């Protein structure tokens, strides 16, 4: 045994020309050139993430104070103050309700004299908080169920599929309102419960996509080979199947973020009492809905915020799908 | 074929049974809200024991005091006879309340599907046969635009621009536009006054229809692209058939089969989208009712009823889609 190990490698392999990995920015440039819409989407998503990391500054908001030219500053903790309205709620400014957009209030003020830009920044954090948690839950549970049911097939797959059929027969928004309103976990409305409900609603669609990919991967020769060399089911799923569906999962995740933001704002729009207090784009839109004639800006900016972020994640997910996983095209 | 249909129907019964069970358990996770609403928080009772008693009476009146299996058995046997119980809030039979509100919802959904298909068919086909041309890019941009922007945001923008004009202009662009696409109050049934009814329904139908049409168009486009590369299409070309005939009779007919399934799947999201549209345009449909039913305290029988009726509708239409699918594609029929 020892001798065998000692045998030196006789001749070094002929020097092969290893193609150099192109610089990341070249890849990014190529992506931008080939998928201009996708690049716009990623830009919008990035902008939203940037807003999420920041905190609106100023009281009711002169967000455009000279020392904070962007109207928000980075660094505030993610979990702090995502809801606290008081931060920029100022009694004196009540009289200045529905001020038009100006240098002082970029997007104008709302019915209570609150700065709309500042509220949008706060709402961004909340939208992303809910969306990221929801998608984390939906992709984790959906992928696990999808891989297991697709891998084992037979009666397990059939029964899981029926349960998913049933879950999908609930119109998503009804299921969402229902879960949020019976919520037994916390005393009042709670963001995590909303995220949990959204995640639950999203599980079937993730599961379906993952299962579809697993069904085709399962028949591949390398999976068969893994079984032949005695890999356990768990190992096969973890090391042979899961890596192959990662691309699909990334795509599902990015498109799902848009869907989740949309659902959260739709919920805020139709049932604001089911949301915890604080700024939410949907609630802002719903509150100002009737001011459409007198103060269009109060409606326009929240609506635009929702539209751009949902559009951004959709465009990004779409382009990512084309690049990463053309099989998923729908 | 018969066996196929029977199998699908049995499967669907099972799915409905699961839905009914899920919604039954879901609303009963926490009953304290409903009891509070029924008793009004037991005002006037300052004694702990009195409050207990008052709540117990309310619980008994709502039928929530019985053990869960018994409630479940009653619920299922009632359901088998298509009895959804009595609404907690209005004290009327739930089925009657739902039946009243089905009409506007179904009308809106139908109008949306029709608009979606009318728009998506030509757009999808043109986009596919002129692949990567400026026309294709333009149409695809519009479809992703309608896909990406939530229907209620589109609705609000439409109302905003037609009622108060673009921010740069003063006043609404035109009175007729404001009349058709502006904000709405009150609802007139189609049978009462079709013209007035259309004034209310056209805007949400167009908005929802275009959003749905965008999905159908994208799917149809990719299906067409696939079909157009098939051998039999090339054969048709080399036989010297007219372009029209090849595209409509040979390609489109085959590309449409999978599109049918997508339309079936989309119905669920149409129902969801219409909840919000019904709110904005004050249409007294199912979506409006479900929001009312869960507001403050959930009205169990109504919520159960709506979920089951909607699920029945979705499952039934998907069954039709499945049957049509089997009918259009013999490979499925015989498998």
Image: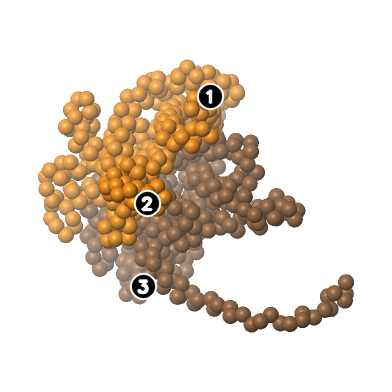
Which one of the lettered chains is coloured brown? Answer: A
Q: Is residue B272 visible?
A: no
* Residue A199 percent coordinates (x, y): 51, 47
Q: Rounded to the nearest whole Å, what is the CA distance between mark 1 and mark 3?
A: 57 Å
* Residue B25 percent coordinates (x, y): 55, 31
Residue found at x 60% / y 45%? A150
* Residue B207 percent coordinates (x, y): 28, 44
Q: Secondary structure at mark 1?
A: loop
Q: Rounded to the nearest whole Å, what is the CA distance between mark 2 and mark 3?
A: 64 Å
Q: Is residue A146 visible?
A: yes
Q: Which mark is residue A68?
A: 3
Query: In this rendering, is residue A110 above or below A9?
Result: above
Q: Which mark is residue B64?
A: 1
Q: Secondary structure at mark 2?
A: helix
Classify residue B103 by image quadrant: top left
Which chain does the numbered disc 2 sit on?
B
Q: Rounded to the nearest whole Å, what is the CA distance between mark 2 and mark 1?
A: 67 Å
Q: Secondary structure at mark 3?
A: loop
Q: Does the CB distance between marks 2 and 1 fall below 8 Å?
A: no
Query: In this rendering, is residue A156 above or below B45?
Result: below
Residue found at x 66% / y 81%? A14
Query: In this rendering, is residue A43 above or below A86?
Result: below
- Report whether mark 1 lies on the same chain as mark 3: no
Foreground tag (2 vs 1): 2
Residue found at x 42% / y 42%? B258
Which one of the lettered chains is coloured orange? Answer: B
Residue to which mark 2 is pinned: B234
Residue found at x 39% / y 42%? B254
Foreground tag (2 vs 3): 2
């Amino acid at each position: 045994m020892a001798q065998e190990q000692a045998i030196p490698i006789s001749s070094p392999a002929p020097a092969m020309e290893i193609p150099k990995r192109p610089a990341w920015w070249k890849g990014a440039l190529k992506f931008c050139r080939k998928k201009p819409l996708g690049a716009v989407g990623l830009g919008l998503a990035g902008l939203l993430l940037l807003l999420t990391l920041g905190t609106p500054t100023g009281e009711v908001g002169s967000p455009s104070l000279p020392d904070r030219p962007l109207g928000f500053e980075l660094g505030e903790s993610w979990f702090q103050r995502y809801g606290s309205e008081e931060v920029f709620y100022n009694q004196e400014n009540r009289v200045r309700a529905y001020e038009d957009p100006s240098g002082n209030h970029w997007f104008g003020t709302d019915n209570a004299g609150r700065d709309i830009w500042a509220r949008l920044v706060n709402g961004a954090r909340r939208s992303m908080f809910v969306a990221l948690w929801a998608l984390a839950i939906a992709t984790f549970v959906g992928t696990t169920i999808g891989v297991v049911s697709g891998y084992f097939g037979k009666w397990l797959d059939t029964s899981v599929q029926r349960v998913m059929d049933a879950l999908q027969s609930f119109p998503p928004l009804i299921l969402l309102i229902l879960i949020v309103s019976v919520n037994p976990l916390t005393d009042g409305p709670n963001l995590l419960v909303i995220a949990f409900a959204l995640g639950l609603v999203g599980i079937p669609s993730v599961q379906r996509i993952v299962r579809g990919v697993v069904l085709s991967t399962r028949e591949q020769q390398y999976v068969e080979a893994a079984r032949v060399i005695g890999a356990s089911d768990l190992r096969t799923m973890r090391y042979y199947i899961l890596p192959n569906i990662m691309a699909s999962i990334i795509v599902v995740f990015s498109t799902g973020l848009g869907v989740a933001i949309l659902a959260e704002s739709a919920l805020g729009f139709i049932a604001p009492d089911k949301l915890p207090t604080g700024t939410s784009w949907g609630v802002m839109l719903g509150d100002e809905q009737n001011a459409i004639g007198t103060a269009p800006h109060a409606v326009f900016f929240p609506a635009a915020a929702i539209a751009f972020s949902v559009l951004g994640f959709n465009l990004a997910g779409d382009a990512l799908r084309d690049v990463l996983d053309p099989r998923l095209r729908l | 074929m018969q066996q196929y249909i029977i199998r699908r129907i049995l499967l669907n019964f099972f799915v409905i049974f699961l839905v009914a069970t899920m919604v039954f358990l879901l609303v009963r996770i926490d009953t304290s809200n409903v009891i509070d609403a029924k008793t009004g928080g037991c005002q006037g009772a300052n004694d702990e024991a009195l409050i207990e008693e008052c709540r117990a009476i309310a619980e008994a009146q709502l039928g929530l005091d019985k053990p869960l299996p018994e409630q479940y058995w009653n619920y299922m046997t009632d359901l088998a006879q298509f009895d959804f119980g009595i609404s907690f809030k209005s004290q009327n039979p739930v089925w009657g309340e739902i039946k009243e509100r089905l009409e506007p919802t179904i009308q809106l959904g139908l109008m949306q599907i029709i608009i979606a298909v009318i728009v998506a068919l030509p757009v999808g086909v043109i986009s596919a046969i002129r692949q990567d041309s400026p026309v294709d890019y333009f149409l695809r941009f519009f479809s992703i635009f309608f896909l990406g922007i939530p229907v209620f945001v589109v609705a609000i923008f439409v109302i905003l621009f037609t009622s108060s004009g673009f921010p740069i202009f003063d006043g609404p662009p035109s009175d007729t536009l404001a009349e058709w696409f502006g904000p709405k109050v009150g609802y007139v049934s189609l049978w009462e006054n079709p013209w007035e009814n259309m004034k209310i329904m056209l805007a949400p139908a167009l908005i929802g229809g275009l959003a749905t049409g965008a999905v159908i168009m994208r799917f149809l486009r990719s299906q067409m692209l696939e079909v157009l590369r098939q051998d039999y299409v090339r054969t048709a070309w080399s036989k010297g058939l007219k372009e029209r005939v090849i595209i409509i009779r040979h390609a489109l007919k085959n590309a449409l089969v999978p599109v049918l399934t997508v339309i079936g799947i989309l119905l669920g999201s149409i129902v969801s989208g219409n909840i919000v549209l019904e709110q904005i345009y004050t249409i007294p449909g199912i979506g409006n009712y479900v929001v009312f039913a869960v507001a403050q305290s959930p009205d169990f029988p109504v919520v159960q009823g709506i979920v089951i009726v909607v699920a029945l509708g979705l499952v039934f239409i998907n069954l039709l889609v499945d049957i049509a699918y089997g009918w259009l594609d013999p490979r499925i029929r015989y498998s």
